[in-house]
Amino acid sequence: MLANTEIPYKAVDRFASTLRTFHEHAGAIASGRAEGDAFTWFLASEYEWEMEMACTWLVESPESRLSDAEKATLSHFLGIMPEVRDAIVAGRKQASDRGLQSAEPEWADWLEIAALPSWNNFTVRTAILLSQLGSPAWNDTHFDADQG
């Protein structure tokens, strides 16, 4: 009897869910706004990590419905993630070592994060990638995986 009993569960489209996560975090990074506020060191690292995990899944999972060209573009984009992650960690440590205190600490954080060259590069590339994810950015040397 038990074998014939249906157990209700919510089906999840992993591809759609992962792509949505990627878009949400990428959109926040491209706009410089996280959850309606400026980025803190913590949020910058969380958003970068979430985006990297989603991007990795979209490139590597057999469930991904992206084209091979889109996967190559995202794979090339993943190449900048370690530099961005390291810059966030180093910047956060330097800020804590200085004991930076402000009435609005998140704004002070955001000014320092925005000053990171790797974060600026990441933001620009993310904005371009978002605008062109549906069709690979063949004419943009930053994203054309064959130009690497």
Image: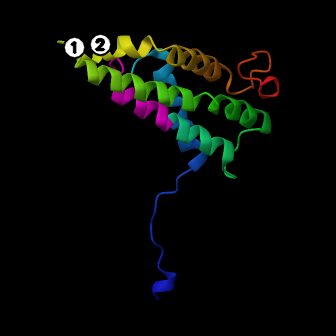
Q: Residue at x 43, y 13 (%)?
A: 114
Please identify the dominant SS of the magenta region.
helix
CA gap, disc 1 and disc 2:
7 Å
Amino acid type, residue under disc 2 in the picture: Ala
Q: Residues within 10 Å of mark 1 (few under 14, many from 20)?
A: few
Q: Are marks 1 and 2 in contact (CB under 8 Å)?
A: yes
Q: Which residues make up the magenta segment?
A: 35-50
| Magenta-span inclusion, residue 42 | yes
Q: Which residue position is annotated with label 2?
A: 108
Amino acid type, residue under disc 1 in the picture: Glu
Q: Is residue 18 visible?
A: yes
Left of 130 or right of it: where is 103?
A: left
Look at the picture and state if 7 lies above or below 91: below
Local secondary structure at mark 2: helix
- Where in the figure is residue 7, as x and y percent of width and height? 45, 71
Q: Residue at x 75, y 25 (%)?
A: 136
| Tally of numbered discs | 2
What is the residue that sits farthest to the bottom in this orientation? 1
User: Which colouring convention does the figure follow?
Assistant: rainbow
Q: Which residue position is annotated with label 1?
A: 104
